[in-house]
Image (cartoon, rainbow, N blue to C red):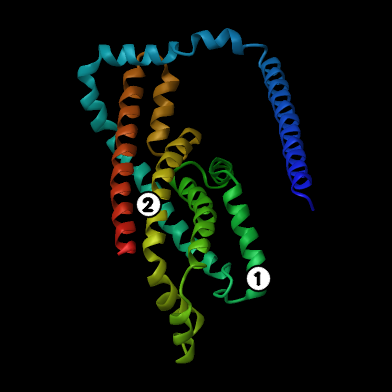
Amino acid sequence: MPTAAIRGAYLAQNRRKRLYGGVLLVFFVALMAGGFDLADARNAGGFWNGITHVFDFPAEVLGEAAGKLHELPAHFVTFLPALIETVNIAGASTLVGAMMALVFSLLATRGLALWPRAIPLFRRLMDVMRAVPEIVIALVLIFILGGGPVPAMIAIAFHTAGALGKLFSEVNENADLKPVDGLASVGGNWSQRMLFGVVPQVAPNYLSYMLLRFEINIRASAILGFVGAGGIGYELKNAMSWGQGKYDEAAAIFLLLFATIVVVDQASGVIRNRLSATEVH
């Protein structure tokens, strides 16, 4: 084929790509605009009226907190147990979810699975587990079990198992199978091959993903407190529901939660970096 013909075909293909991209962009913008208009109409057209007051509530909270600045240390002490409960929910759910994810990921990894034909089943199961939002699971469990930290822990652990299971299975695919084959040659069963042949290789990656998930679960456990799942989110909901007169407590809770997330984020980042450096060496 002549060079001119190849060049012409290439330019024509690029023009078609740009045309298709432009059509998709116009369709996407029209879809977003139509969806916004519909949502605004369902909301009685309150978006444009309310957008001008978006900073009113933060201003009230900060103003009341500034007027009661001397009371903030006492509020920190008061809400510290609720913060500890939130961190405990996140820690327990991360640990339980990671243990479930470990098993599911090994059962869903080619070359490692105990039942190779069941690999698609375990993968779809993990898809479902991470597709259902924690708040939906928590609401169902609260209806069944009542309010408290247990429904939050189960809901977050369920979602964590699906999310970490996907990540763990990708890590497992890079594991060296020579130790697994060696253990199989001396009569090791499937559990022994996985525990002593695979897990030691991928443990640093597992721990790194667990730390990242722990940060996410702290935020999730605080959010679930708004639906009655306990922890500092429940206290924040109560403080905000009272309105003026309790905004200083809401500000104290915000500061506690923000400081905790920053500390955990920085600490886990340092640990993950050290794990990565150790793995490289």
At a point 54% along the width and 44% down the height, the residue shown is 134
How busy is the neighbourhood of tag 2: few (under 14 within 10 Å), some, or many (20 plus)? many
Q: Is residue 168 visible?
A: yes
Query: Which mark is drawn over residue 198?
Result: none
Instruction: Give how far apart the Cα atoms at labels 2 and 1 are.
Output: 29 Å
Indicate the amino acid at tag 2. Answer: Leu
The image shows residue 16, relative to residue 157, as above or below, that is: above
What residue is rendered at 58% in x and 7% in y? 49
Front one among 236 and 131: 131
Residue 246 showing in the rendered view: no
Secondary structure at numbered mark 1: helix
Residue 66 image-quadrant placement:
top left
Q: Is residue 260 above or below residue 61?
A: below
Name the spot of residue 50 as percent of width and height, x first: 55, 10
**Residue at the image point whose x is 76% and y is 30% from the top:** 23
Using the rendered view, name the quadrant where residue 7 is placed: top right
Measured as percent of width and height from the top left, residue 65 is found at 30, 16
Horizontal side of 269 relative to 110 (left or right) equals left
Considering the image in quadrants, where does the C terminus appear? Answer: bottom left
Q: Nearer the viewer, residue 203 or 56?
A: 203
- Left or right position of 227 against 60: right
Residue linked to disc 2: 211
Residue on which the image places disc 1: 118
Q: Is residue 277 left or right of residue 183?
A: left
The part of the image, by quadrant, that contains residue 264 is top left
The amino acid marked with disc number 1 is Ala
Percent x, y for residue 39? 68, 21
